[in-house]
Amino acid sequence: MVLLYTPKITNRKKYIFDLIINNLCGYKYEITDNRKNYINYEGPKINYSKDPIARDELFLFSDGLLEEKAIKQKDIRPVLYENLHIIFPSAHTDSALPYDPFSAAFYFVSRYEEYLPYEKDIFGRFEANQSIAYKHGFLDKPVVNHYALRISQLLHKKYPGIKPAKFNKFRFLPTYDIDGAYAYKGKGVIRTFSGYMKSLIKCDFKSIEQRTKVLTGRETDPFDTYSFQIELHEKTGIKPYYFFLLADYGAKDKNLPVNNIVYRKLIKKIGDYTVTGIHPSFASNNDPGKLKEEIRRLSSILNREIKHSRQHFLILDLPDTYHRLMHEKIDNDFTMGFASHTGFRAGICSPFLFYDLKNDAVTNIMIYPFTVMDVTLKNYMKLNIQNSYQKVIKLIDEVYDVNGTFITLWHNESLCDCDQWKGWKELYLNIFNYAAKKQMSKK
């Protein structure tokens, strides 16, 4: 067991010690503010304070962020140290690291910068170009996992006999957002007629022909890629997560009608074999009643409580979004990531509990940060298939190197291998198989 000394125990310290020392490094530990007991302890120990106090200790300088309660503007100037971007540097010559890894990790995972003034995008989101990591070129590196790795290495060097109580392994977790379950099926008379008229005005006779064949049962709906997904999961043993949009129809929420039998059968089919969560609508961000109703709808279809979610359009307003989700008893959220860029929004590639800076307390909602989204690669970053593959493989390797969890966000329509998504089905298959093999190699 590691004994961790700090002169003042705070909520922030307890939270980040548990994340870094226990969850990421895998060590059992205790915190103490009793100086005498710490000095007399003969096992592995970390002194997190302003100055060293014991001869046989691992001393890490404390910057002071974790003793604050307020949210203040910080002068964050990342610098490179051993090929790793660090913040909260320290000039203390006795510190085992020239920076405060606990404050640095806390700043990223708490999303401290998202509580400060920033310029929102057209959907009101904090986007990648506003983040410190993007501005300084390390958004594609899970720095928090690396901070933990450095601490673990220092402990092993200082105490060669120390062994973690648990070992983290690389994990691949594919997830899917079902915004529009089908291209043509189940849309009702009015939307179907409107679709025909739009195609006719554009002289898009190919779409008219395809829609007719699908609706008459002579052709499979192009967005019906679920058999491909299920076969891929069963073949590799990789467990996916699905998120269904069950909103009232609106400008930003264009899913199939909630009572449509085809849509409900699909949800039940997916829900019978894997974890299924709610995809809270764009409209629900301004109406908590809609969130409650959408969760109720999914619960009614699946006949079970709904514990997982991911926001439609990745709308995430901290901490209010998580407050609403927790109020509806959502335990796990998968929204943490950027629409406009790949990488690690919270600087981490492992699930973590959300820390509510506004109330200065850890919450019970587990955050699963995703790393890459199909739309990000194609529409935002405008990468071709070859460059997308190279980008994603590099990200997988980054996560693999720190034994993290690699989470993808894909949509059923991007696997249709048609129109704008021609060739992306094969790209996904190659990415999926690469990540699956990486997971198998860690067993």
Image: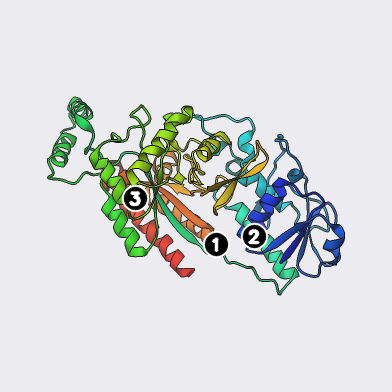
Query: Does the image show residue 21?
Result: yes
List x then y, in percent, for residue 127.
Answer: 53, 36
Mark 1 → mark 2, Cα distance in angstroms: 14 Å
Left or right for 330, reference 257: right
Count of numbered badges drawn on the protein? 3
Mark 3 → mark 1, Cα distance in angstroms: 29 Å
Contact flag, marks 1 and 2 (Cβ < 8 Å): no
Q: Amino acid at mark 2?
A: Asn
Q: Quadrant of the N terminus?
A: bottom right
Q: Secondary structure at mark 3?
A: helix
Q: Does 278 appear above or below 16?
A: above
The figure's colour scheme reads: rainbow
Q: Secondary structure at mark 1?
A: loop
Left or right for 430, reference 264: right
Depth check: give the residue in front, 140 or 67: 67
Mark 3 → mark 2, Cα distance in angstroms: 33 Å
Depth check, mark 1 against mark 2: the one in front is 2
List x then y, in percent, for residue 295.
Answer: 41, 39
The residue carrying mark 2 is 22
The residue carrying mark 3 is 271
Contact flag, marks 3 and 1 (Cβ < 8 Å): no
Q: Amino acid at mark 3?
A: Gly
Q: Amino acid at mark 1?
A: Asn
Depth check, mark 3 against mark 1: the one in front is 3
